[in-house]
Image (cartoon, rainbow, N blue to C red):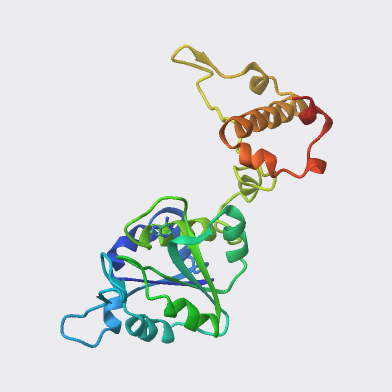
Amino acid sequence: MRIDVVSIFPEYLAPLDLSLVGKARASGLLDLRVHDLRDSTTDRHRTVDDTPFGGGAGMVMRPDVWGTALDGLLGEETHLLLPTPSGELFTQRTAESLARESHLVVACGRYEGIDARVAEHYRERVRVTEISLGDYVLNGGEVAALVVVEAVARLLPGVVGNPQSLVEESHGAAGLLEYPVYTKPPAWAGLEVPDVLLSGHHARIARWRRDTALERTAARRPDLVAALPVDELDAQDLAL
Ligand code: ADE
């Protein structure tokens, strides 16, 4: 997969050289390129923004500068992502769908955002999705780009060593938060690892994990429980 990220702060994306994403890049599974939006400016001051038409606080990013940057990157297969607090919620389902794409371009806005004509214009040429990480406001799209790249890259075949670890995690196929996990030592700070996990009894362990995942999800994310398809619940779940 290829991902291009465009930003006025390319250094913000430096962590994408580390850890799993860094390894995916080094091994060629992920071709990730970061571009400086200011390279698409034409004036001496490398201006990327201007005052909003209609008045109001802050500055808006100019469509012509973004146009130059994006025209040089978009191909027929591109899915253009525009991080913004007014976008669609970015979820594990979004990451799964994006992981099947061949080319993503993430255009990181700053200030009050990117002139709305950019999304409108490119929608005629490629798929465009405005995405939000959640109901809060960040200073720009760079953190969202880090999130998207990490969430998508770990789903690419070969990036995570044991693909089974992608199946059981939170927001996985079960639609639940993950059960609590423990390792050695079996007793720490006066707290014991639940006996069932030391029992070696696989069916009971699986049942305990399912129950704790359900309890946890009901307590922390009732919205996820409400969204569970009833036919995916077993008789014991319904007894909880
Ligand atoms: N840019 C600013 N806030 C954002 C958010 N919540 N999600 C995505 N991009 C953003």
In the rendered image, which quarter is residue 178 located in?
top right
**What is the x, y in percent for residue 149?**
47, 61
**Residue placed farthest to the left in the image?**
44
59 vs 85: above or below = below
Looking at the image, residue 183 sits to the left or right of residue 35; the answer is: right
| Quadrant location of the C terminus in the rendered image | top right
Q: Would you identify the image quadrant in which residue 141 lies? A: bottom left
Figure disc tally? 0
Q: Residue at x 55, y 81 (%)?
A: 126
Place of residue 67 in the rendered image (x, y in percent of width and height, measured from the top left): 39, 84
Residue at the far top: name it.
Answer: 190
Picture layout, residue 147 above or below residue 25: above
Quarter of the image that includes the N terminus: bottom right
Q: Residue at x 27, y 81 (%)?
A: 39
- Where's residue 128, x and y in %? 53, 74
Between 194 and 89, the residue placed more toward the observer is: 89
Percent from the top left, x then y, of residue 130?
49, 67
The quarter of the picture showing ligand 1: bottom left
